[in-house]
Amino acid sequence: MLQLFTNKFYRLTFCLSLSLGFSISSLQALAQEQSLVSTSASFLHLNVADLDRSLAFYHDVLGLEYVNPPGEPFPGEGLSGEANSMLRTAVLQTPNGAVQFELVEWLNTPVRPMHPWIQDPGAIMLGVFVRDLDSMLVRAKDLGLQVLTETGESYVAETNRAIMLRDSDGYMVELIEFTDREFTDPGEVEYIRVWLSVADLRQTVNFYNHVFGMEMDSAGPVGPANDRIQALFGDRSIATMRTAQGTFPNSDITVFFQEFTGPTRQPVAHRVQDPGGPIFLVGVNDFEKAIDTIQNYGGLIGTDQKSGMLETGQTQSWIRDPNGVLIMLSQGELQL
């Protein structure tokens, strides 16, 4: 995380058992692809324009608990590259402690609010499993959150009902209430799934598998978007979608990836400090090899829209995945 960035770190060593008959180049490619693995990954960090306004929803309405409550601003120049920039943060978790994420407000630096839509590569959606959808919806509306779902009412399926909201920074929040079982967890929220919209699911799966050692299956064929998806987002132009999910090795951070076609797509392409932009912090077992692999699989080095050069011996850098998402990459344990 940007304030609390160490949690649990484990190291995993992969041994390759290679038979004779491969060419040298094949051996090198295979070794590179199979030995890279994340050694740590922090939870999701979401940039917001107004931390107090965001907490009025995520803490007061959803009932997420503080791991780290908001405190005094602290220097952020080392992250943003902007002189005198400051940031305020708050770390939240579900009442059962299963999921955590951090809200980050930047101060004393120009920001460009993103306000992405669900089809935009780099957009984040939170799937929030709740005890009482109707009660939360009333309070969310009172705060001015936008309801995207057709008719403004929940979409009823066989085992659940759901409604899609858009918060003040453009993050999509799906409230889901199961109707086929009792809600037995403490508090009002059981679990949160993190969804990341991507430009090309096949490319994204290859990137995260080869750079971070995720073990996702190859992306399947594109399928038509069903009635539920179109109704939840209030957009009948969504034509197709496909999904995948992967977990960063040596962490419990799982990301659900989704690709949409139909509406015009505009990559988020946020800067470090821009509201509406997500950030991950990830350590790897071989930084130099990861940098080469990132570029081979469609990622970028640095925060710009084209790759930059790293200094000799550098072991930490911002990178972008193929969808423009910013990731702080480091050798082993992240040090900010």
Image (cartoon, rainbow, N blue to C red):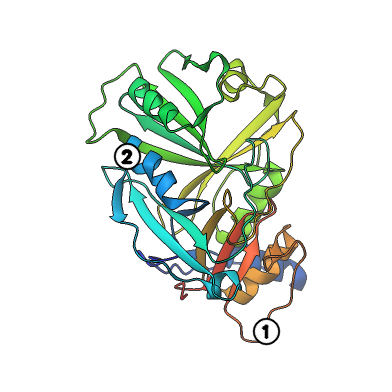
Measured from the top left, where is residue 140 in percent x and y?
41, 30
Task: State the quadrant of the N terminus.
Answer: bottom left
Judging depth in this view, the residue of 172 and 158 nearest the camera is: 172
Q: Residue furthest bottom?
A: 312
Question: Of residues 190 and 247, which is closer to you in this image?
Answer: 190
> Label 2 belongs to which residue?
60
Identify which residue is drawn at 54% across, 50% down.
215
Q: Residues within 10 Å of mark 2 (few under 14, many from 20)?
A: some
**SS for dot 1:** loop
The x and y percentages for residue 247 are 48, 50
Q: Nearer the viewer, residue 104 or 224?
A: 104
Q: Position of residue 90 (x, y in %)?
A: 37, 56
Asked if disc 1 and disc 2 are in contact, CB closer than 8 Å, the reply is no
Query: Taking 2 as reference, is 98 above or below it?
Result: above
Amino acid type assigned to the residue bearing label 2 in the image = Asp
As drawn, is 55 to the left or to the right of 79? left
User: Is 65 left or right of 148, judged from the image as shown?
Assistant: left
Measured in 3D between alpha carbons, the distance from the residue under mark 1 to the one under mark 2, in whole angstroms, is 45 Å
Residue type at tag 1: Glu
Going by the image, does 83 lie left or right of 65? Answer: right
Q: Quadrant of residue 40?
A: bottom left
For mark 2, give the secondary structure. Answer: helix
Answer with mark 1 or mark 2, whichever residue precedes in sequence: 2
Find residue 61 and report its horizontal and vertical position in percent. 34, 35
Front position among marks 1 and 2 = 2
330 vs 289, left or right, is left
Q: Residues within 10 Å of mark 1 (few under 14, many from 20)?
A: few
Question: Which residue is nearer to you in this view: 156 or 110?
Answer: 110
Q: Quadrant of residue 184?
A: top left
Q: Quadrant of residue 54?
A: top left
Q: Is residue 32 visible?
A: yes
Number of the label disc, if any, that sits on residue 311: 1
